[in-house]
Image: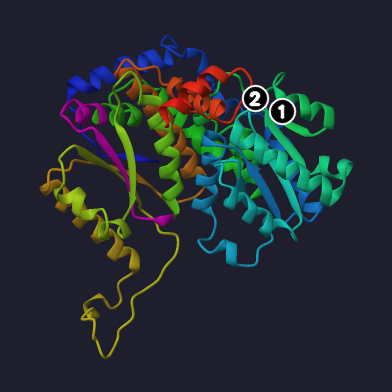
């Protein structure tokens, strides 16, 4: 079970408990987007079995590479899970599992051209994830990938190689999927993108990569029961309270720290979750991330002695899962023979403890979190914990955790500058500003 070793003051615990009442009482702003609270227990065999049937079918076709198309919450949860669970050098090692690659999460022509270089001679299928089917980045990527598959396999055969994860009844992608006969999975109306990792948005790519989505859901269900309890020892309440106490004391930046590189994209997922949920109405803690010990040699100086406006949340892993012992070197030119016989992970742990003490001495508070190991069950726990704590934390600030009005600003400007019909006046005004 995930451990949260923080001790916020009773004042902030009480505020977090009231926010917990708002979240679980479904009485706050955005309460029509609380379907994620029920996902772990309510994701039925129809969904899991349907996902497993796609996996089996694409294995029978010999699919090597799956292009996963989506942006933001439509791909980050899957990527975070897959990067955490797969071998660090999976891309360079022979494997029977399907490789997941990503498209539509940026608009780089170079990136997408190189993607087509890579898949040109591969056995390919595609998962396209979009509730509307009109979000620019994934929509233009899907145009290109769909065209590639149709040329490579023909119009009819390509339909078997495309699965759409989209709205149940409406939208451009749902319309196309119905016309073409693509298999589909539903993005629930009451689940926003950044809370969707435990829907088919995340579950399908994770299963295609060869990982156990039943265990992922079991971990999330276990944590959901814990987070639902209204008590001061609830880990989501404690973390939310500790964050808000730091924020009230002038700490405006939270750095999520890991000492295991496999968790890098968990941090990217976390940044979107907290950034989009809390960063609005002129308030919010800015989410950042680092990977130690690597970033101690780049960002470490600033964290230790820069402006005192930040605090750290540190994820530690109690069981490494592998063993590697440091050997004796007769020459001892590096002077490190005192480490002979020690495990790499013991050194990593001492670096972690030493960093925590140094940063605390430097005025950087630390909020320690610990998971047992990196596997599907523990990741399921971690995802649900962060989601529940995010809702509680945002409600503590009086923020709606489930909207993102600011995201639309760049889109309107982009559409105008690209010449979208109906945006002519806005385009003229923007072009004048850019002179």
- Which x, y percent locates residue 295? 30, 56
Residue 228 position in % (x across, y down):
42, 23
For the C terminus, the quadrant is: top left
- Residue at the far top in the pictured view: 27
Residue 201, relative to residue 257: is it above or below? above
* Residue 252 forms part of the magenta stretch: yes
* Mark nearer the N terminus (2 vs 1): 2
Judged left or right of residue 9, residue 405 is: right
Residue 173: numbered disc: 1
Name the side, left or right, on which 85 lies relative to 272: right
Residue at which label 2 appears: 132
CB atoms at circles 2 and 1 under 8 Å apart?
Answer: yes
Residue drawn 29% across the image and 86% down it = 329
Crowding near pointer 2: few (<14 within 10 Å), some, many (20+)?
A: some
95 part of magenta stretch: no
Counting from the top left corner in percent of width and height, residue 57 is at 79, 46
Q: Which residues are magenta?
A: 243-261
Quadrant of the rendered image containing residue 354: bottom left
Q: Residue at x 50, y 49 (%)?
A: 375
- What residue is shown at x 27% (from left), y 90% (from top)? 330
- Figure check: 329 above or below 364: below
Q: Nearer the viewer, residue 139 or 209?
A: 139
Q: Regarding mark 1 in the picture, which secondary structure is present there?
A: helix
Instruction: Say what secondary structure mark 2 lies in.
Output: loop
Color theme of the render: rainbow
Q: Pick the residue in front: 68 or 191.
A: 68
Rendered residue at 78%/34% (across/down)? 183
Q: Is residue 169 left or right of residue 336?
A: right
Q: CA distance from mark 2 to mark 1?
A: 6 Å
Q: Is residue 192 visible?
A: yes
Q: Quadrant of the N terminus?
A: top left
Residue 213 spot, x, y in % from top left: 60, 42
């Amino acid at each position: 079970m995930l451990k949260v070793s923080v001790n916020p003051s009773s004042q902030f615990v009480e505020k977090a408990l009231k926010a917990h009442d708002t979240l679980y009482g479904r009485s706050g702003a955005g309460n029509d987007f609380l379907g994620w609270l029920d996902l772990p227990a309510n994701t039925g065999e129809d969904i899991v079995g349907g996902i497993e049937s796609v996996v089996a079918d694409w294995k029978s076709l010999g699919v090597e590479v799956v292009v996963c198309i989506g942006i933001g919450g439509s791909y980050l949860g899957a990527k975070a899970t897959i990067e955490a669970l797969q071998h660090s050098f999976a891309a360079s090692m022979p494997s029977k599992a399907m490789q997941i690659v990503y498209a539509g999460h940026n608009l780089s022509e170079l990136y997408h051209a190189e993607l087509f270089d890579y898949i040109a001679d591969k056995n390919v299928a595609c998962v396209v994830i979009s509730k509307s089917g009109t979000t620019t980045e994934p929509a233009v990527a899907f145009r290109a990938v769909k065209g590639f598959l149709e040329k490579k396999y023909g119009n009819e055969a390509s339909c078997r190689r495309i699965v759409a994860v989209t709205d149940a009844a409406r939208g451009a992608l749902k319309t196309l999927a119905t016309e073409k006969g693509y298999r589909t999975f539903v993005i629930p109306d009451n689940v926003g993108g950044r809370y969707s990792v435990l829907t088919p948005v995340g579950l399908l790519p994770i299963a295609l990569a060869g990982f156990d989505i039943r265990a992922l859901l079991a971990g999330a269900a276990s944590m959901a029961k814990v987070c639902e309890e209204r008590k001061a020892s609830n880990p989501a309440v404690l973390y939310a309270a500790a964050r808000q106490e730091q924020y009230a004391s002038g700490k405006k930046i939270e750095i999520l720290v890991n000492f295991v590189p496999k968790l890098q994209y968990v941090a990217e997922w976390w940044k979107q979750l907290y950034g989009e949920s809390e960063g609005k109405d002129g308030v919010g803690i800015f989410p950042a991330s680092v990977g130690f010990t690597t970033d101690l040699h780049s960002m470490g100086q600033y964290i230790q002695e820069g402006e005192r406006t930040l605090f750290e949340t540190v994820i530690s892993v109690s069981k490494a899962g592998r063993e590697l012992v440091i050997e004796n070197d007769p020459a001892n030119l590096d002077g490190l023979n005192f480490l002979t016989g020690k495990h790499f992970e013991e050194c990593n742990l001492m670096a972690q403890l030493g960093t925590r003490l140094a940063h605390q001495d430097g005025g950087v508070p630390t909020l320690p979190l610990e998971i047992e190991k990196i596997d599907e069950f523990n990741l399921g726990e971690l995802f649900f914990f962060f989601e529940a704590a995010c809702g509680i934390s945002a409600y503590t600030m009086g923020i709606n955790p489930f909207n993102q009005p600011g995201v639309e600003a760049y889109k309107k400007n982009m559409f105008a500058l690209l010449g979208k019909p109906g945006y002519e006046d806005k385009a003229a005004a923007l072009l004048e500003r850019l002179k």
